[in-house]
Image (cartoon, rainbow, N blue to C red):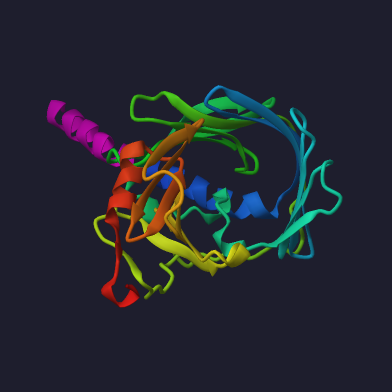
Amino acid sequence: MQRTLISLALTLLLFTPAVAQDEATTLLDRMTQTVRNLNYEGDFVYQTGEVLNAMHIVHSVREGFEKEHLSTLTGPKREIIRDDYTITRLTPDKERPSVSERRRSHLPTLASFDPERLASLYRIEVIGDERVAGRPVTLVAVMPKDAFRYGHRLYLDKETALPLRRVVVDRKGATISQMMFTTIEISEMDTQPQEVSETPVEAVEYDGEWSFDGIPAGFIIELYSHTEPAGQARDHFVFSDGITRLSLYIENGSGGQDNRQTSVGGVGILSTKVDGHKLTVVGEAPLDTLKIFLRSARRNSAGK
């Protein structure tokens, strides 16, 4: 009898973590669908470092087309209107709005989570139940297995799996940044929701003059663009491991400081020079990780 109880206990110990991770992964899968397809309106606060801002959001989906309207509730008045194709920015000090093309599949949103890809880099588990904005939520922790990235605590609405709070933490558990709804109204999902692809995000094909060797495991180039604002050539790379995103900008010229290191809240900004080019990396990741990305950049001989 005693041996049977011990065997049962060992079985439960081995089985429970797998069940917990499966449950967490299922919740994240639901989140990637609902974050784009739900109609909702509410107020949320966003804290990074010691800076706290409040915003109002209206998100709607009609006949498969998504639209989002953000407006500031603190500080200077600003508005951002986003649809499937463009992002429009409105500020009182400018007569004309700023309109830019939206790269839809590469926006750093919670809709681009890839739980299966994250499993090799993060420990994903359900922690328990809490309340946010007066609604019951399930807390899911996505914690890194190495020191190259921050952890994420996601508070998902029990009814819809919409993230009502998101906290980014370092390895000691200290808060780097957080977003939390204070009020929210959720209506029914659109009858013709957007189809969120279940195909894993793949690295873009890039065979240019720069290479990046030795970057942390799991990061791939999800987006690359080349622009020439005011005649100044600029390459923009977006690296992602499925949840953490870093932007690396490469510009011609030798102006400015040789090396720069700063941070705005939890977002680090580092720059250096390589072969007459200024490289700047920006992202919500440990400074040591940003340094690795700068050190990894090499200009191929064909581009010299």
Viewer-closest of 43 and 273: 273
Residue 140 makes an appearance in the image: no
Q: Is residue 198 above or below residue 57?
A: below
Q: Residue at x 32, y 44 (%)?
A: 291
Residue 15: percent from the left, percent from the top? Answer: 29, 41
Of the 4 image quadrants, the one containing the N terminus is: top left
Q: Is residue 101 left or right of residue 112?
A: right
Q: Residue at x 53, y 55 (%)?
A: 112
Of the 4 image quadrants, the one containing the C terminus is: bottom left
User: Which quadrant of the structure image shows residue 53?
Assistant: top right
Residue 156 makes an appearance in the image: yes
Q: Is residue 12 magenta?
A: yes
Residue furthest right in the image = 95
Residue 144: percent from the left, percent from the top? Answer: 34, 40
User: Which quadrant of the structure image shows residue 197?
Assistant: bottom right
How many discs mark residues in the rendered view? Answer: 0
Viewer-closest of 111 and 303: 303
Q: Residue at x 64, y 44 (%)?
A: 160
Q: Is residue 285 left or right of residue 129?
A: left
Residue furthest front in the image = 255
Q: Is residue 237 above or below residue 123?
A: below
Magenta region: 1-19
Q: Is residue 143 above or below residue 250?
A: above
Residue 183: percent from the left, percent from the top? Answer: 74, 29
Q: Main secondary structure of the magenta part?
A: helix
Q: Residue at x 86, y 50 (%)?
A: 95
Residue 200: percent from the left, percent from the top? Answer: 44, 64
Q: Is residue 82 magenta?
A: no
